[in-house]
Every structure is written in structure tokens, then in C-alpha cells.
Image (cartoon, rainbow, N blue to C red):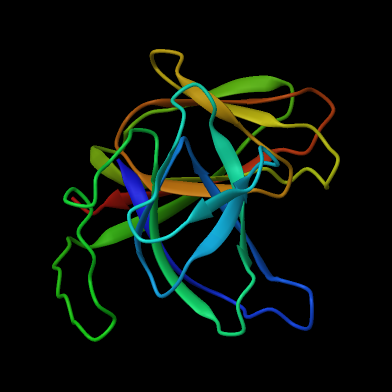
Amino acid sequence: MGSEYSITIPAKVGNRPGVLPVNVRGKFLLVVSATGAFKFEADLRGIVPANTGTNWGTASKPFRVITFFNSTGSAIDVDFWVGDEQASAQQVVSVAASQTIFTKDAPTTPVASTAPAGATTTFGGTNAGRTRKQFAVFNAEPLGGSDITLKDNDGNGFTIIPREKISFNSSGVFKVTVPGGKEDAEIMETFYDA
């Protein structure tokens, strides 16, 4: 499972390369297409040259920020995929911006709540008999504050840094832990209507 992104790395200005930081979360990066050669760096691990087809990452080292560099005089368009498992270009299906895709989805109802500080709060995959479609959590701590943790029922999970919001589709059970004396985490769940 992963996500595809489309970006434009700005052209260099004078002797300074064009720079574009992107907040992403994953372990692997696949460049699906690029209009030119560029470089990137994930979480300050060293600059890597890249172009269409570049497949980079390590299962044991997740990253949060990728900074893209362009040393040419023209902007570079890049479509890339980020995920927790290595993928090939044949596994990633791109959709052109000129294509229209219609999807039909059942009506939903949002339900807002909080995960209080100093506790671990469990969020089930249902509410009043309705199945959850999407789960979102926001760490309301100011920058420099405390991380919160999000784990599934098996104890797998990750930290959410201050001012970061994540959302994903899932009807699974999640546990959100917020340190004591800190801001409550803000939760938004979207449930399918009955």
C-alpha cells in the first residue's frame, strides 16, 4: 500500500538549485516519471541522483520528509510513489490529469471526538452499527511538543509529530496514546450511513 504524488521541482536560480521539500511517510520511493534528472534526500540521509525508474529505500528505515533538488534551468515535473513495501513501475497505475474517473461511494457521516491527554483511547471500527470508512488524527501539540502514538490492535503503529495530521481509509481498531499534561489529540472518523 502506498500513495502517488505529482510535484514540480522549481528551476535553479543563479547558482542555487531549485528546492522542494515534501512531507511524506514511507520506507520506499519509486519515481514513476520525471521530465528530467534531479536529486533528492530523505530525512538528511544523503543526496541521491534520480530519474524515471529510480527505486530507493530500506524496509528498516522509514522517512517523513523528502527534499527534491533541481540544478537545471527548467522546472522538472515528477510523479512518484511512496509506500512501506518496495514496488515496481508495473504495480503503480498513474492517472493523467486530463482523465476523469467516476466513483460511486455510499453516503457517510463524520463523527468528531478527542483522545484525552494522559490516556490511551481505543477507537473501534464501528459506531452505532455503522462501519468506519476513514480515520483521521491530528496532534494538536505546538511545534517542539510531544509526539503521540497510533497503534492497531496488534500493537503495530507509529508516532505522530506535533501539528501533523494523518488520515487513511480503515475500519480497523486503533489506539491513540497522548502523554499526560499535553493537548488532546483531535479525531475525525467518517462512517458509512446505515
Please identify the residue farthest to the top as the structure is shown.
154
Image position of 170 with respect to 18: above or below: above
Q: Quadrant of residue 126?
A: top left
Q: Is residue 58 above or below residue 68?
A: above
Q: Is residue 173 left or right of residue 45?
A: left
Left or right, residue 80 beside residue 107:
right
At horizontal 67% and vertical 20% (from top left) the residue drawn is: 119
Task: Tell me if residue 146 can be seen.
Answer: yes
Q: Position of residue 163 (x, y in %)?
A: 71, 49
Write down the quadrant of residue 123 in the picture: top left
Q: Residue at x 73, y 29 (%)?
A: 117
Residue at 79% in and 83% down: 14
Q: Is residue 188 visible?
A: no
User: x%, y% of residue 106?
Assistant: 17, 60
Nearest the eye: 43 or 173:
43
Count the marks.
0
Indicate whether 125 appears above or below 64: above
Give coordinates of residue 153: x percent, y percent: 39, 17
Locate the N terminus by quadrant.
top left
**Image x and y of residue 72, in percent:** 60, 77
Decide if residue 94 is on the left or right side of residue 76. left
The residue under the point 23% across, 52% down is 89
> Of 87 and 23, which appears nearest the observer?
87
Nearest the viewer among 179 and 30 is 30
